[in-house]
Amino acid sequence: MAVFKIVNLVLLIIVASYAIYLFANLLFTRYQYIKLGKKEEFDRDFKERFRGVLVNVIGQRKMFKDVKSGIMHLIMFYGFFIIQVGLIEIIIKGFIEGYQYPIGALHKPFHAMQEWTAFLMTVAILYACYRRYGEKLNRLQWKKDGKALFVYIALSTLSATILLTLGFERIMFGYEANYAYAPFSSIIATVFAGVGTTVGTALFYASWWIHLVTVLTFMVFVPQSKQAHEVFAMFNVFFKKGGPVGRLKPINFEEEDVEVFGVGKVEDFTQQQLLDLYACVECGRCTNMCPATGTGKMLSPMDLMIKVRDHLTEKGAAVTSRTPWLPAFAFSHTTGNQMAAQAAGGQEVAAGYDVNLIGDVITEEELWACTSCRNCEDQCPVMNEHVDKIIDMRRYLVLTEGKMPAEAQRAISNIERQGNPWGINRKERENWRDGRDDIHVPTVKEMQKAGEEFEYLFFVGSMGSYDKRSQKIAQSFAKVLNEAGVKFAIIGSKEKNSGDTPRRIGNEFLFQELAQANIEMFQKHEVKKIVTIDPHAYNTIKNEYPDFGLEGVEVYHHTELLAQLIKEGKITPKYEVNETIVYHDSCYLGRYNDVYSPQREILEAVPGVKVVEMERNRQDGMCCGAGGGMMWTEDHSGQRINIARTEQALEVNPSVIGSACPYCLTMLSDGTKAKEVEDTVKTMDLAEILEKSIVKQEEKVLQ
């Protein structure tokens, strides 16, 4: 027996050492690939970073967006770590017969916890397998994911062999059944009681070795599969870029040695962006919620991440000469290993690696399908950011190669010439206020001439200034402010486009010009508070203008201000608005800025209104299709996103589809026309609904 234990120990040391070597090698290789990316400044807000890890990794917060998966993953996540605590004890049992941790009376409850955890792990794994292959959830790609099946087999084997090892140990030593503290091993021992001590001992060591080999094999498998998120997710959450969610990083156009703008090669991404790729869980939650995917477009956020990750792995192998797949002899046929071998042999394979990130890996069609709604990022359990990668690649197309859809090019050219996407004369920007003679909308210049001061600068935006339908929103909002006695002013013809459209399309240069011009105007007039009816302008001014010098300015969306005025009693909805209203959440108001309550508070304050909700609302609300500059382009594949969203609204039988965004209102209005229900289902902004409850309609005098 002593010889057997020595041989057993030697084999364990050899197998474990080889597995640990492979695991460490694979992790270091991925680290080297990530280092190919550009360095970026690290925000040292450690308190917030540790909070992010606590909430999203330890607390598994985002996993519970799908409750079933959340519970299942919670058991597997914590179960995996709990059973590893007992792994050392099980290993020692192979050399010291009957070994137990020296924790005295605590060992019995510890043993019970180990067995129950192993059992619950097995149940959770079986349920996970059922969800993929039984329910056949599309987001899990059940038809083609063989690696997932390996994970289920490995984890279930790992859990089952714990119980089998402990059960056969009871037979080996003749332990009595103890269903209180060792329920499952006692059942196994009872079932196999007739095999005898010798066979029981053989089965113990067989289970023991199967367990250890499974643990070590899975350890090597993790870094080179989607299970890599088990290693990288925590780091990804910790090193996530700080600041407002969805904020895009500016390009420094003053760097003289920079000839290429945007991301045209995978190494042009930052190291944090590349870390995202290996943290991807491949759970499909992002793709499941993507409006482009859901309406038949080419884009799938998950596939985009996977394709860029695989491209990074192959190019990383060519550049670093480090083999991506181990053990190497088993993966000699892979492109990555072949390129690493060639590079190690002195061949310049990196120069000959002619796979283009945009074109060969990611198509232009995919990039132009994104509406930048952040539904993908909101769903991601490991805090991956998809939108900034797409915008960075758009920047390369627009700024370096001069490519963009023709409709988008028209809108950009019009903004460059006249400051608005339609190309209407910039001098007409303030003419919207002439549409009604019952509102008072002074310009900043007019206020100064009258010797008056204003509290809020009303940033009208291009939609409110030029679009006929959106002008009515601006007029209604102005009327409500007049009724509340709020002092406000507009810039007028000097107001520039907020720059959201150029920036999301990829023209960062134009965006920065517009931002700097608007900021100069704000500073010139000593603006302290800004309110806007446009969530895109709201997000841009509030979260992105500070990168260009905007300081000390409070930014409000008009629904935030209206809800505040109602609470303060400055306006009181009194006339009934007998409508059934379903509210559509704006992406840039909701997922970008977490503003969901003020709009519903306004509707609840209006007498006669019955509020209903779409199935997809608040954080899960679906985009209208206008974001990311897509307002100015045409859908060339699949169903129109705005029609799909309109159909979701019509499912709850509203008489009014409410909105708090002129872009959304335009898209939803087009949707009701396409569905031929515009005569029975109205589309209105919340400011218009509120005005109806504050001002008698006959008081409105139209020119």
Image: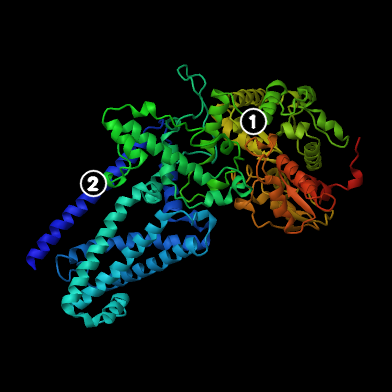
> Horizontal and vertical percent for residue 327?
27, 46
Q: How is the image coloured?
A: rainbow
Query: How many C-alpha atoms fall within 10 Å of the one at disc 1: few (<14), some, or many (≥20)?
Result: some
> Horizontal and vertical percent for residue 53?
42, 49
Does residue 617 appear to the left or right of 12 in the view shown?
right
Residue under circle 2? Answer: 21
Residue under circle 1? Answer: 405
The one of 613 and 315 positioned closer to us in this rendering: 315
Does residue 556 appear to the left or right of 488 in the view shown?
left
- Residue name at image x 38 percent, y 65 percent: 121
In the image, residue 106 above or below residue 37: below
Inspect the image, locate mark 2, and give the three-letter code of the amino acid beneath it: Tyr
> Horizontal and vertical percent for residue 26?
30, 44
The image quadrant where one finds the N terminus is: bottom left
- Residue name at image x 79 percent, y 38 percent: 478
Secondary structure under tag 2 reads helix
Does residue 3 appear to the left or right of 676 in the view shown?
left
Q: What is the residue that sits farthest to the left in this orientation?
A: 3
Q: For residue 101, which quarter of the picture?
A: bottom left
- Residue name at image x 70 percent, y 54 percent: 648
For marks 2 and 1, give the one nearer the viewer. Answer: 1
Q: Gap between marks 2 and 1, in whole Å?
A: 50 Å
